[in-house]
Amino acid sequence: MSQIKKNLTEDLTSLQTRINQYCAAWTTQAGEPDWSTIEQLYANEDLLHYDAVTPHSFANVAGMKEAFAQMKKGLRLTSLELKARKNLNVFRRGDIVWTTVLQDIIAKTEDGKELKFVQRQTGIWEERNNNWIIIHEHLSAPSSLQDQNN
Amino acid sequence: MQQTLINQEQEAFFKQRVLDYHAAWSPGCEQFDIAKAEHFYSQRPDLSAYDIMPTKEPIIGWENYKAELIQIMEGFAKFTLSLTQDDVRVFQYGNIICTTSDFRIQGTLKNGQPIEGMGRTSLVWELQADGNWLIVHEHSSTPINR
């Protein structure tokens, strides 16, 4: 028999709060996320995190910083906004939880363009020192499978 | 608690299991048979998944996911996933195993349109009472090229 517990009230409350902190940390009006908060959201060891865009994976926050700088320059990004929807699911097995939630993203560029998309997030979290820490993350957006002729 | 170091035997077991799972999802030109894949999954209603095609909401429960997967695969005349053991990583956290894998997708839709791309899958595996490890969460996707 499975020992997975789905959507316990205390898990929904604490993870929704944590994911809202996550979205706030990645949201920026000045071009830079709140890296000090982001560093506290992820485990401080080399793991694997899949991003929705290429380069598609990172081992740690240092890799995210490097990719973000490249993306900011490439897209001439002026601001980024993330907002989690209220469709959070939390699955618990012992001391580990995994979550699914959709996040609305709005990216604005120097030339006034506004890019909007919905991001699907899987987070695997572990509670360390009374804080939920991401030990694996998979972010994705609608399929980018390419027509070979394009 | 931090990531538990997995021994070589366990790592080899899960790498092979992930390769077998991908083989089940890689029918080539043959007709896809869900029976070859479904034994990897928990059949319980607490299974959760994001599949590779552009559905937004996560799918909850095996019966819902199975119906979605069959519908997706019916759209392909050819569907092949390519990866090696080096493309699979295995992490243990407490009582669960998380595997990640990177692979190439090549295929043809039934309307003749070829598709090609890079894919990634994260799987959460749970040990069952009978000693079998089953997938309880799946997230498959293709990254956006920016």
Image (cartoon, coloured by chain):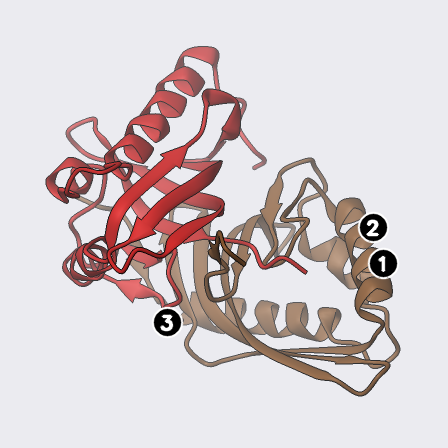
Chain colours: A brown, B red
Q: Secondary structure at mark 1?
A: helix
Q: Amino acid at mark 1?
A: Ala
Q: Measure the alpha-carbon separation of dots 3 and 2.
A: 30 Å
* Residues tagged 1 and 2 counted as in contact (Cβ below 8 A): yes
Instruction: Provide residue B11's location: percent of width, then percent of height.
Output: 44, 19
Q: Amino acid at mark 2?
A: Glu
* Circle 2 residue: A66
* Circle 1 residue: A69
Left or right? Give the position of B55 relative to A52. left
Q: Chain of mark 1?
A: A
Q: Secondary structure at mark 3?
A: loop
Question: Is the residue at mark 3 from the same chain as the one at mark 2?
Answer: no
Does residue A31 sit above or below B13 in this rendering?
A: below
Instruction: Determine crowd level at label 1: few under 14, some 14-19, many 20+ residues with C-alpha closer than 10 A.
Output: few
Q: Quadrant of residue A12?
A: bottom left
- Please tell me the numbered disc located at residue B57: 3
Question: Is the residue at mark 1 from the same chain as the one at mark 3?
Answer: no
Instruction: Provide residue B119's location: percent of width, then percent of height.
Output: 48, 46
* Residues tagged 1 and 3 counted as in contact (Cβ below 8 A): no
Tell which of A150 and A79 is nearer to you: A150
Q: Measure the alpha-carbon separation of dots 1 and 3.
A: 30 Å
Residue at figure coordinates x 72%, y 42% from the top left: A44
Q: What is the number of callouts on the image?
A: 3
Q: Chain of mark 3?
A: B
